[in-house]
C-alpha cells in the first residue's frame, strides 16, 4: 500500500478514475474513510488515494476545494473556454454575453475562442475582437483544422483546469483532439446520432492534456438561463460600461431611458459596441420580466 495525490477525471457508478502525475490513471473506489466525509467527490477534485499492489486505488480524502461549478459539476475550475464559430453555426452574441455573466457570477475567468476563421469575411474577425475587447474575456482567434493557430490558446491552458463550452458544431471536439490526440472526441458526428434517435447522454470528464493541465468537456452547456442577477447589478457585468457609467447624470442610472446617460453616449460614439449594449437591454428586460425570452430549446444535450 502506498499513498498518492491525484485528480478525479471521471466518475461513473461509484468508480472514479484518478490521474496521478508521473504515475498515470488509477481506477478507484470511494469507500472507507470517505463515507464519513459528507462531500460527494466531483471530477476535478484533488484526492488522496491509497494504491494496492494490483494497481487498484481507494479514495481516502477529498483535498480542499477551491470552487465547484454546478453545471457541469466540476471542482477546482480555473477558467472556462467558450468556443464560438465565426459562422456555421451562426454567431449569437447574446449567448456569449449570457455565458460571460454566468461565469463572472461564479468567479470563473473566461477565454473566448472565435473558431473557423477560414470561413470569415473580410473584417469580420476584427469586428468581433472590437466587440469583446472590453468584456473582460481573453480573446483567441483559431482555425481548429490548422493546429498552428492553436498555439496561443494551448499556452493559455497550461497548468490550469479549463471547462470547455459552446454550441454544437463550433469545433470543440476538433480543438480538444488537437490539444490531446488521445481524447478522440467524435467530430461532427453528433447530428448523425440524433437523426438516428440515439441517446447521447454522457458524463463530463476531464482530459489530462499536459503537466497539471486538464480540459473538461461539458455536455449540454448551451441553454443558458441567466442566473439570479438583480437589475441594478446587470451593468456591472459589462466591464466596458464602468468608466462611462461614472459620468451618467444619475448615480443609479440604468442606461436605458434616463437623460444624460454617458453609457448611451459612449455607444453612440462607438466606444462601447452597440451589440453589447443591445444584449444589455435585452437581458435587462428579461430579468425585470418586461419580456420573457425563453432560451432556444435544445434538441439534444451536446457533447
Ligand atoms: N471550416 C472549418 N471547419 C471546422 C473548423 N473547426 C472544426 N470544423 C468542422 O466543424 C464541424 C464540427 O466540429 P466539431 O469539432 O465536431 O464541433 P463540436 O460540436 O463543437 O464538437 C466538423 O465538421 C469540423 O471538421 C475550422 O476551424 N474551420
Ligand atoms: Mg463535439
Ligand atoms: Zn447611464
Image: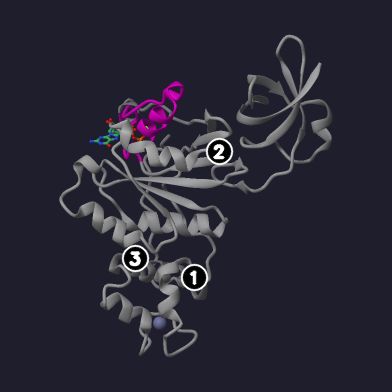
Q: Residue at x 54, y 32 (%)?
A: 206
Task: Please say whether residue 256 is visible from this viewpoint.
Answer: no
Q: Residues within 10 Å of mark 1 (few under 14, many from 20)?
A: few
The residue that disc 1 covers is 236
Rendered position, 233 above or below 221: below
Pair 3/2: label in front: 2
- Pointers 1 and 3 in contact (C-beta within 8 Å): no
Question: Which disc is residue 276 wearing?
Answer: 3
- Pointers 2 and 1 in contact (C-beta within 8 Å): no
Q: Residue furthest left?
A: 122
Q: Residue at x 38, y 69 (%)?
A: 280
- x then y, percent, for residue 264: 33, 79
Judging from the image, the colouring scheme is: one colour
Q: Which residues are magenta?
A: 168-191
The first of marks 1 and 3 along the sequence is 1
The first of marks 3 and 2 along the sequence is 2
Q: CA distance from mark 1 to mark 3?
A: 13 Å
Q: Residue at x 49, y 46 (%)?
A: 80
299 and 226: which is toward the camera: 226
Rendered position, 242 above or below 117: below
Task: Please say whether residue 53 is visible from this viewpoint.
Answer: yes
As helix, strand or loop, the secondary structure at mark 1 comes to helix
Q: Which quadrant of the view contains residue 292?
A: bottom left
Q: Which quadrant of the view contains residue 178?
A: top left
- x then y, percent, for residue 249: 42, 90
Question: Which disc is residue 159 wearing?
Answer: 2
Rendered position, 151 above or below 296: above
Q: Residue at x 57, y 56 (%)?
A: 107
Asked if the beta carbon under badge 3 is closer than 8 A to the nearest atom of ligand 3, the reply is no
* Quarter of the image that includes the N terminus: top right
Amino acid at each position: 500500500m502506498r499513498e498518492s495525490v491525484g485528480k478525479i477525471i471521471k466518475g461513473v457508478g461509484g468508480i472514479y478514475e484518478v490521474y496521478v502525475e508521473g504515475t498515470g490513471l488509477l481506477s478507484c473506489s470511494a469507500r472507507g474513510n470517505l463515507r464519513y466525509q459528507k462531500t460527494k467527490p466531483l471530477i476535478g477534485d484533488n484526492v488522496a488515494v491509497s494504491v494496492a499492489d494490483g494497481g487498484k486505488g481507494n479514495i481516502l480524502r477529498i483535498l480542499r476545494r477551491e470552487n465547484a461549478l454546478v453545471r457541469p459539476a466540476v471542482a477546482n475550475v480555473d477558467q472556462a473556454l467558450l468556443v464560438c464559430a465565426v459562422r456555421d453555426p451562426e454567431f449569437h452574441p447574446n449567448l456569449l454575453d449570457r455565458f460571460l455573466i454566468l461565469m463572472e457570477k461564479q468567479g470563473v475567468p473566461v477565454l473566448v475562442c472565435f473558431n473557423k476563421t477560414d470561413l470569415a469575411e473580410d473584417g469580420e474577425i476584427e469586428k468581433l475582437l472590437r466587440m469583446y475587447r472590453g468584456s473582460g474575456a481573453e480573446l483567441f482567434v483559431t482555425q481548429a483544422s490548422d493546429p498552428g493557430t492553436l498555439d496561443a490558446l494551448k499556452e493559455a491552458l497550461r497548468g490550469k483546469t479549463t471547462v470547455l463550452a459552446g454550441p454544437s458544431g463550433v469545433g470543440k471536439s476538433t480543438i480538444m483532439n488537437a490539444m490531446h490526440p488521445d481524447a478522440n472526441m467524435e467530430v461532427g458526428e453528433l447530428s448523425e446520432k440524433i437523426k438516428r434517435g440515439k441517446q447521447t447522454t454522457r458524463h463530463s470528464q476531464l482530459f489530462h492534456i499536459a503537466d497539471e493541465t486538464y480540459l473538461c468537456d461539458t455536455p449540454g452547456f448551451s441553454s443558458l438561463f441567466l442566473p439570479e442577477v438583480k437589475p441594478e447589478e446587470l451593468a456591472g457585468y459589462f466591464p466596458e460600461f464602468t468608466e462611462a457609467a461614472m459620468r451618467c447624470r444619475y448615480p443609479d442610472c440604468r442606461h436605458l431611458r434616463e437623460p444624460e446617460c454617458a453609457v448611451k453616449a459612449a455607444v453612440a460614439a462607438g466606444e462601447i459596441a452597440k451589440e453589447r449594449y443591445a444584449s444589455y437591454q435585452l437581458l435587462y428586460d428579461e430579468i425585470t420580466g418586461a419580456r420573457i425570452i425563453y432560451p432556444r430549446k435544445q434538441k439534444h444535450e451536446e457533447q
